[in-house]
Image (spheres, rainbow, N blue to C red):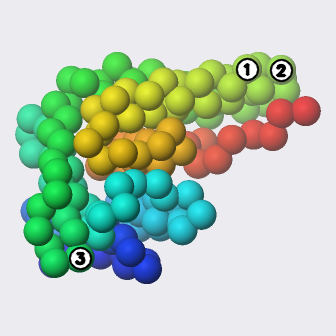
């Protein structure tokens, strides 16, 4: 069985076998990322979309939009290599942030800003790749977060969530 989050007009499903093969901790990460995407004040996606399914394979992430009658509206295939450099950069910055704890506020703020910039660049790529879905930048940022958690076991990354407050 896969996880389904439901709000007024949208839901996101993580397909099998991805869901059933994951640890409970990873499923928790996915639920949080999905809830972040489905926040009514944030989500911007084509108006006739009711449900998105995400299936992860060895080669790609497959995203499909469905209407309220479950008819397919559009699909996007994102080969893993299209996100690989973004994921590597982001994970490296998260690891640097974890190591830098205690090395001074200036360094932490610089790394945190770099993490935000990396997240924005990844969102730009997601926005282009998912053009048929008509998502905005903030939705692309949140979708990147979800896709990142599908590709990387983020439960093992210290410092992944949130950003430090810059003075």
| Image quarter of residue 78 | top left
Crowd rating for badge 1 (residues with CA inside 10 Å; few <14, some 14–19, many 20+)? few
Earlier-in-chain disc, 3 versus 2: 3
Q: Quadrant of the C terminus?
A: top right
Q: Is residue 38 above or below residue 61?
A: below
Q: Residue at x 81, y 40 (%)?
A: 165
Crowd rating for badge 3 (residues with CA inside 10 Å; few <14, some 14–19, many 20+)? few
Q: Which mark is residue 97?
A: none
Alpha carbon distance from label 3 to label 1: 44 Å
Nearer the observer, disc 3 or disc 1?
A: 3
What is the secondary structure assignment of the residue under circle 2?
helix
- Residue farthest along the front direction in this orientation: 47
State if disc 1 and disc 3 touch (CB < 8 Å).
no
Earlier-in-chain disc, 3 versus 1: 3
Q: Is residue 98 above or below residue 38?
A: above
Q: Position of residue 152 (x, y in %)?
A: 33, 42
Nearer the observer, disc 3 or disc 2?
A: 3
Q: Position of residue 56 (x, y in %)?
A: 16, 49
Disc 1 target residue: 110
Alpha carbon distance from label 1 to label 2: 6 Å
Q: Which mark is residue 68?
A: 3
Q: Residue at x 16, y 78 (%)?
A: 69
Q: Position of residue 164 (x, y in %)?
A: 75, 40
Q: Position of residue 111 (x, y in %)?
A: 67, 23
- Residue farthest along the right direction in this orientation: 167
Q: Residue at x 29, y 64 (%)?
A: 49
What is the secondary structure assignment of the residue under circle 3?
loop
State if disc 2 and disc 1 touch (CB < 8 Å).
yes
Disc 2 target residue: 106
Residue 37 seen in the figure: yes
Crowd rating for badge 2 (residues with CA inside 10 Å; few <14, some 14–19, many 20+)? few
Residue 95 seen in the figure: no
């Amino acid at each position: 069985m896969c996880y389904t989050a439901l709000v007024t007009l949208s839901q996101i499903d993580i397909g099998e076998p991805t869901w059933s093969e994951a640890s409970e901790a990873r499923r928790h990460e996915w639920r949080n990322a999905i809830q972040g995407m489905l926040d009514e004040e944030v989500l911007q996606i084509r108006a006739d979309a009711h449900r998105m399914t995400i299936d992860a394979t060895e080669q790609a992430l497959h995203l499909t939009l469905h209407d309220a009658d479950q008819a397919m509206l559009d699909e996007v295939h994102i080969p893993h290599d299209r996100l690989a450099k973004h994921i590597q950069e982001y994970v490296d910055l998260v690891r640097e942030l974890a190591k830098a704890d205690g090395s001074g506020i200036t360094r932490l703020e610089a790394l945190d800003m770099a993490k935000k910039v990396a997240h924005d660049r990844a969102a730009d790529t997601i926005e282009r790749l998912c053009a048929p879905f008509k998502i905005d930048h903030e939705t692309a940022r949140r979708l990147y977060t979800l896709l990142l958690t599908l590709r990387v076991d983020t439960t093992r990354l210290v410092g992944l969530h949130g950003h430090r407050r810059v003075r």
